[in-house]
Image (cartoon, rainbow, N blue to C red):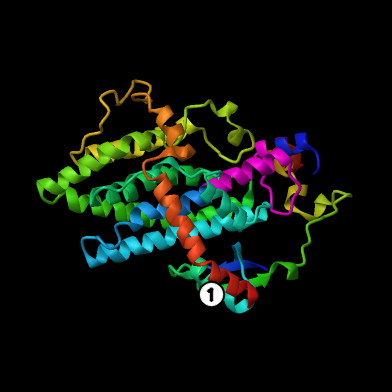
Amino acid sequence: MRDEQAFIEYVQGGGQVEAGDWMPDDYRAKLLKFVEMHANSELMGVLPEREWILRAPTLQRKLALTAKVQDEVGHAQLIYRVAEDLGKPRDAMFADLISGKAKFHNVFHYPTKTWGDVGVIAWLVDAAAIISQKALLKCSYAPYARIMKKICWEESFHILHGRDVILAMVTGTPQQFELVQEALNRWWGPLMQFHGNPIPRDEDPMWFWRIKSQGNEEARQQFLDGYVPQILELGLEVPDPKLRKNEEGVWEYSEPDWAELKHVVTGHGPRTAERLAFRARFLEQEQWVRDALVAA
Amino acid sequence: MIWEVFRRGRAGAAFEHSGSVEAPDAEFAEAWAREQYGRRGESVALWLVPRDAVHVVDDWADEFDLKYRRVDGYSIKARLKEARSRVGSTERRS
């Protein structure tokens, strides 16, 4: 198959593409950009949690958090490998990440102020992410869809770990409960921005090429459906007075701050510069390891 | 060098292609693959195969449409219906 129109019909009909198959340049470029951003997000996503490994409240929490961080770095390794097969060397991806040319998800640009943030990240940020990732199980690019199986399997442990952290705190002292509520208040905005602006599915190039199998708003609705009841049953409040499910079963909410989303993902988040500098420092510091391996 | 990773999830299950790792030799590929495809006890065995060693066959000629050799070559619904309708009818008894 070397014909763009035939390729479009093939992927739109549910067909999947392998690494060695012919694909239109536009498909390859959009797919690579998407996969690269996903890999960057996994790699940068460990930094907010890493800050709490040494401050975890118990040894068991410390071990679990370390395992989660290890998983996320592992996901980055799997996804970078997929991106490399699409034609971009890893060094080039790291260079673009550090220079700010490549993006990573909005939620990883924010600080983790308290242990409550760690719980909210593992529970709700991972929940939002797993909704996007489960939709990628049907991605038109088969090698990406296949590794997503393993990633989703590991993410389910992360969500349970996060829920367990949250449950320990909401059943603890009033101060602990308050830490969770404060963290939820801080994260609600970025969480509502996470799945992107409500661009209609048919205008989304990622849907056109069937890289994504659902629209942004569908993903957000699914998140609200699944997690608002879980939040409310714990006695927590969602910091949005307009949030409600209407008669048609559709969630209504205050307009997320799209300007903030754009500002943050273009490299102006509260922790963007600090975290990229951290990543750059470690890449430089460990260059000798990579050099030694290649030389071996 | 790219190594394709095949994973066996439990004894008796088929090896399934799971992804790939890049490593200069088998020893390092093993370390990488153990970490990425086995660290949570999700595999009982791995096969690591250099990508270049995989001989791919993916062109299948079926120009004569030899469907009689497959189940989709047979549509028995109409004939079965007819056969069933004949059972017990005078036409068949006579």
Residue plotted at (25% across, 54% down): A164
Residue A5 can be seen in this image: yes
Residue under numbered circle 1: B31
What residue is rendered at 60% in x and 67% in y? B6
> With respect to residue B8, does A45 lie above or below?
above
> Would you identify the image quadrant in which residue A228 lies?
top left
- In this rendering, is residue A78 above or below A15? below
Of helix, strand and loop, which one carries label 1? helix
Nearest the eye: B41 or A59: A59
The outermost residue toward the left is A173
| Residue type highlighted by circle 1 | Ala
Residue B90 in the image: x percent, y percent?
72, 37
How many callouts does the rendering have? 1
Q: Residue furthest top?
A: A247
| Classed neighbour count for the residue bearing mark 1: other residues with Cα under 10 Å, few (<14), some (14–19), many (≥20) | few
Chain ID at mark 1 = B
**Residue at 35%, 58% in the rendered image:** A50
Residue A18 magenta-highlighted: yes
Query: At 66% across and 42% down in the image, what residue appears?
Result: A29
Q: Nearer the viewer, residue B18 or A86?
A: A86
**What segment carries the magenta color?**
A9-37
| Image location (x, y in percent) of residue A132 | 47, 42
Residue A222 appears left or right of B69: left
Q: Is residue B38 above or below residue A139?
A: below
Of residue A124 and residue A114, the one placed in the foreground of this image is: A114
- Quadrant, the C terminus of chain B: top right
Give the quarter of the image for residue A190: top left
Residue A184 vertical position relative to residue A294 in the rendered view, above or below: above
Q: Quadrant of the N terminus of chain B?
A: bottom right
Residue B20, percent from left and from top: 61, 63
The answer to whether residue A150 of the structure is visible from this angle is no
User: Was residue A155 drawn as part of the magenta stretch in this picture?
Assistant: no
